[in-house]
Amino acid sequence: MKVVVFAHTPPPFHGQSYMVELMLAGLKSRDRDGLQIFHVNASLSDRVEEIGKFKWKKLFLLMKYCVRAWRCHLFDGADTFYYIPAPGKRNAVYRDWLAMVFCRPIFKRIIFHWHAAGLGSWLEKEAKPWERRITRRLLGRADLSIVLSEFGRADAMCLSPKRIEIVPNGIPDPCPDFEKRVLPDRQRRQKERSRGELTSFIVLFAGTCSEAKGLFATLDAVALVNQQFTDRRLPISVSLVVAGEFLSNAERNRFNQRIARSDLNACEEQSRCLVDYVGFVSGPKKDELFRRCDCLCFPSLYPAEGQPVTIIEALAFGLPVVATRWRGIPDLLAGSEARLIDDQDPKAIANALKDLLNAETWTMNRKLFLDNYSLDKYVDGLKCAFAKL
């Protein structure tokens, strides 16, 4: 099988592009058993904030990438077309139509990999009848649909694929020294907090900095829990580290205004701001961040949420997680000691954070990562799914 992977890799960096990068590296580094990969880096956006927005240059770029896919078919004999369908966003769906019009007729097999959620509900509730018909005509009856979890099956089923395979995301182990260094440090900090020797609890928000991803609900929750501790005269403070990029200047300004308010910036026993914004981090800086934080808070209601890589990274580091019962997140955290909430309710988030102050979830969450979300399992799962064609 010769596969054209028509998908972009970083930059810009986000969960989907990162998983494509890992897939390509993993498949090319293993015994491929007759599987040959040709990558067309179909990047249409230079920055995260441009993703999903219409620009004329994207149309010309898409045509250029389709020509490259044709060349792979004509000169290299590529017979299978791998593509990542859009979530329920009109501009992105129209992009998929164009890619399918130009590329689907020449390839023997079509593989869809459903990283983003929401297309099924969009087709059912928002799409116009003619949009629904065109989408099902151009994207229907794929030879293989790969979904991240049982939740993602509904999106794939709406287009009647011939086969569906579940392959969860997976990443390289960011802390192979977990047993020797990470776990003992977490146990030490928890014991010091329980004895009153350590008065800090560091919450991490990592991902796209937006309201939909839960940033502002997290800010309100941190302010609320600190106020409750102050009222009860408890000698502990909850601080927040925010890592990621903003999608708009409006949300960046809103963030700056929010952290400047007195409930996050002027506590009687706290001379510094309770919120530290570190921007986009990667590599060793990101690893250090996950090591020193005590909890991940990710109350996302993002419409296209699939399997957030930031949650998988938190599990790898044994971090307790506060998240929403939303899209693919409950499936991702099944078997963990995560605290799931129904909405972006600051009170519920604050209660979950307090509940995790002395929770010992590190080993269980680490085991969940090793059993389900390691890079080897991800790549092997994709190889098996491809082989079934």
Image (cartoon, grey):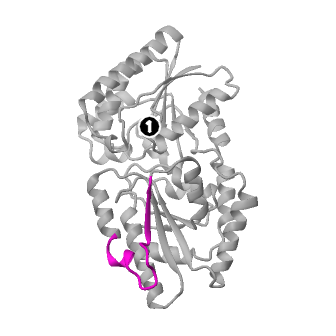
Drawn side of residue 302 relative to residue 185, left or right: left
Q: Is residue 318 above or below residue 230?
A: above
Q: Residue 78: where, in percent of width, then height?
A: 52, 16
Which residue is depicted at the point 47% across and 41% down? 16
Q: Residue 331: where, in percent of width, then height?
A: 54, 55
Drawn side of residue 155 relative to residue 57, left or right: right
Drawn side of residue 160 relative to residue 235, left or right: left
Residue that sits furthest to the right in the current view: 180
Residue 214 sits inside the magenta stretch = no
Residue 275 sits inside the magenta stretch = yes
Q: Residue 234: where, in percent of width, then height?
A: 52, 88
Q: Amino acid at mark 1?
A: Pro
Q: Residue 41: where, in percent of width, then height?
A: 45, 27
Foreground: 178 or 331? 178
Which residue is depicted at the point 26% across and 56% down? 250
Residue that sits furthest to the bottom in the current view: 232
Q: Is residue 352 visible?
A: no
Which residue is depicted at the point 56% across and 58% down? 289
Q: Is residue 73 above or below residue 146?
A: above
- Determine the secondary structure under disc 1: loop
> Where does label 1 land, which residue?
11
Magenta part of the protein: which range?
260-279
Foreground: 49 or 288? 288
Q: Quadrant of residue 383?
A: top right
